[in-house]
Amino acid sequence: MISSPQQEAVDAAIESRRSIRAFLDKDVAREDIERILEVAARAPSGTNTQPWRVYVLTGPARNALSDAILATNADPDQARAHTEEYAYYPREWVSPYIDRRRKVGWDLYSLLGLTRENKEGMAAQHARNYAFFDAPVGLIFTIDRVMEQGSWLDYGMFLQNIMVAARARGLDTCPQAAFTQYHRIIAAQLGLPANEMVVCGMALGWADPDRVENTLVTEREPITGFTTFLEQA
Ligand SMILES: Cc1cc2nc3c(=O)[nH]c(=O)nc-3n(C[C@H](O)[C@H](O)[C@H](O)COP(=O)(O)O)c2cc1C
């Protein structure tokens, strides 16, 4: 296989992306955020519908959303009153998905020195989602409720483009479904119109290289595990 600098750069941007869960207290330039979104919006979408809408939260806006969610999340009774609007995960977990889910969870918690019994520690780690893991930029993504399943495919491509374009600039991300539980708080804080549904959030910033949670490298199935080559009729 012939390799070119362009191929190496693209592969490196994709392969160096990992979900980062601790960020440095260092701003991201507005021009970089704008350019990342501009690049990401080159994502394909069915009949060029471009179903994405992004809210970029920095400074007091980011803090206000985090504070509002964290206050509710800290009280189990209040938290229970908030539920997701759409099912991101299967209602019934089966193998191999449940095994992978458990593995990544325990890999992260054991890096952090959290045991199964330490429910409080795990809850505190989960709560860090709502502080965008201290990233200077919090992104909230919404979709128009009229859009159907196909547009969610387009949306995934857009999200991945953001994460890869961020890597190309030395920036890191963590996509965050955790925000969907608190879509009502997000809608109120951001003044979302009624037709917009929260898809997910994303932390964007500079990875803290000294934090143990950022050393997590997740596994992948070899391609033989998910690919079938058909050569004969
Ligand atoms: C749409 C989406 C939502 C996710 N939501 C969360 C989240 O709320 N919190 C979190 O810590 N990680 C979240 N993740 C990160 C996954 O756990 C992670 O992608 C997976 O374990 C693979 O690890 P990697 O991203 O480091 O390759 C999410 C990933 C995706 C694609």
Image (tube, rainbow, N blue to C red):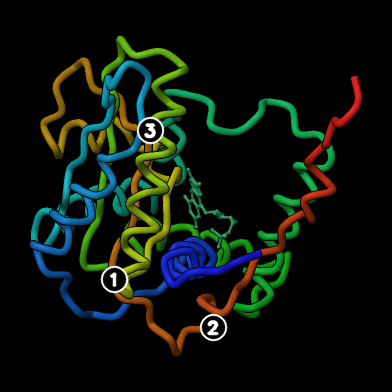
Q: Which mark is residue 155?
A: 3
Residue 118 image position (x, y, % from top left):
65, 68
Q: Which of the two residues, 128 or 151, is positioned nearer the viewer here? A: 151
Mark 3 is surrounded, within 10 Å at the Cα level, by few (under 14), some (14 to 19) or many (20 or more) other residues, namely many
The reply, left or right, for residue 13 in relation to residue 121 is left
On the question of residue 124 being in view, the answer is: no
Taking the view exactly as shown, the residue that stands out farthest to the front is: 2
Report the residue that reaches farthest toward the top: 146
- Do callouts 1 and 2 mark residues in contact (Cβ within 8 Å)? no
Residue under numbered circle 2: 212
The amino acid marked with disc number 2 is: Val
Q: Secondary structure at mark 1?
A: loop
Where, quadrant-wise, is the N terminus in this rendering?
bottom right
The quarter in which the C terminus is drawn is: top right
Residue shown at 24% from the left, 49% from the top: 39
Q: Nearer the viewer, mark 1 or mark 3?
A: 1
- Would you say 168 lies left or right of 27 here? right
**Lower position in the chain sequence, tag 1 or tag 2:** 1
Classify mark 2: residues with Cα within 10 Å, few (<14), some (14-19) or many (20+): some
Query: Helix or strand or loop: what does disc 2 sit on?
Result: helix
Dot placed on the residue nearer the N-terminal end, 2 or 3 = 3
Q: Quadrant of residue 51?
A: top left
Residue beneath disc 1: 169
Q: Confirm if mark 3 falls within 8 A of ligand 1.
A: no
The vertical placement of 191 against 14, above or below, is: above
Distance of label 1 from label 2 (alpha carbons): 22 Å
Q: Residues within 10 Å of mark 1 (few under 14, many from 20)?
A: few
> Is the Cβ of the residue at disc 2 closer than 8 Å to that at disc 3?
no
The mark lying in front, picked from 2 and 3, is 3
Q: Position of residue 149 (x, y in %)?
A: 47, 17
As measured in the structure, the alpha-carbon distance from the residue carrying label 2 to the one carrying label 3 is 31 Å
Could you tell me if residue 1 is visible in this image? yes
